[in-house]
Image (cartoon, helix red, strand yellow):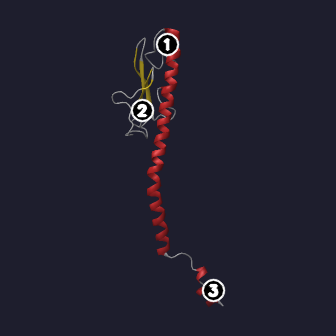
Amino acid sequence: MKRDIMNNKKNRGMTLVELLIVVTIVAILASVALPSWNSQVQKARRADARNTLMFVQVEQEKYRADNGGYASSMSALGLSIYNSTSRDYYNVSIVSSSANAFVASAAANTNGGQNGDSCGTFAINQSGPDDSGSYASIVDCW
């Protein structure tokens, strides 16, 4: 009876070759999925930067309605806590301002996960997203 149990293939378990095949398949799937995952994470972080800039634009318009010109700093808007995005991946600042125009930007934080992102620095002005100069493309990044 014991001999029958030992020869029963159902009780043998996995061989080393079968285990290596499973590990190889998992590694191949991970190598395909990981870059796609990282791309989606970067897109979500970009959305955080864009949303923060749009919030700054709204606050600038409120400030202009009350003061006759745009604010020159985040603290003048009462937004000193918004000097970075919610997860600190981008640094947000007012680049320039006057009575009739302003530019605010969100630059990737060098210590964050967005450092080296292909979109680079996002900007917004009184008219909306700004892709002039070296700012992020409206077509590809906004």
Q: Secondary structure at mark 2?
A: loop
Which of 27 and 98 lies nearest the eye of the viewer? 98
Viewport quadrant of the C terminus:
top left
Q: Nearer the viewer, mark 3 or mark 1?
A: 1
Looking at this rendering, what residue extends furthest in the front direction?
Answer: 139
Disc 2 residue type? Ile
Going 49% across and 12% down the picture, which residue do you hit?
64
Q: Alpha-carbon distance for marks 2 and 1?
A: 25 Å
The residue at 34%/30% (across/down) is 134
Left/right of residue 7 with respect to residue 103 in the rendered view: right
CA–CA distance in space, label 2 to label 3? 69 Å
What residue sits 49% from the left and 23% below the top?
Answer: 56
Q: Earlier in the sequence, mark 3 or mark 1?
A: 3
In the image, residue 48 sits, relative to residue 14, either above or below, namely above
Residue under pointer 2: 138
Question: Which residue in the structure is indicated by mark 1?
Answer: 64
Q: Nearer the viewer, residue 133 or 71?
A: 133
From where the camera sits, is residue 79 visible?
no
Q: Earlier in the sequence, mark 2 or mark 3?
A: 3
- Could you tell me which quadrant the N terminus lies in? bottom right
User: In the image, is residue 96 above or below residue 33?
Assistant: above
Q: Residues within 10 Å of mark 2 (few under 14, many from 20)?
A: some
Three-letter amino acid code of the residue under disc 1: Arg
Identify residue for label 3.
Answer: 5
Q: Quadrant of residue 108?
A: top left
- The percent coordinates of residue 114 (x first, y second) are 42, 39
